[in-house]
Amino acid sequence: MSLSRRQFIQASGLALCAGAVPLRAEASGAQIPLPVPPLLESRRGQPLF
């Protein structure tokens, strides 16, 4: 079976997308949530408290 250029590009794009999709995306255990830094800043980069 011979593939045309268009079919080859479609097949390679599909294979690339299928390879990029993770099969199983889960955390391996209970993780500590990351701290959120203060988002509001005054002058010179000092955070507002």
Image: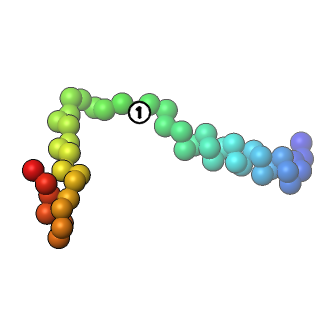
Q: Is residue 27 left or right of residue 31?
A: right
Question: Which of 45 and 5 lies nearest the eye of the viewer?
Answer: 45
Quarter of the image where one finds residue 45: bottom left
Who's the residue at 89% across and 50% down the image? Answer: 4
Who's the residue at 18% across and 67% down the image? Answer: 43
Who's the residue at 89% across and 42% down the image? Answer: 1
Q: Residues within 10 Å of mark 1 (few under 14, many from 20)?
A: few
Question: Which of 9 and 46 lies nearest the eye of the viewer?
Answer: 46
Q: Is residue 37 left or right of residue 49?
A: right
Q: Is residue 27 left or right of residue 14?
A: left
Disc 1 marks which amino acid?
Ala
- Does 45 sit above or below residue 35? below
Name of the residue lying farthest toward the front: 43
Question: Which of 47 and 30 lies nearest the eye of the viewer?
Answer: 47
Tag 1's secondary structure? Answer: loop
**Which residue position holds label 1?**
25
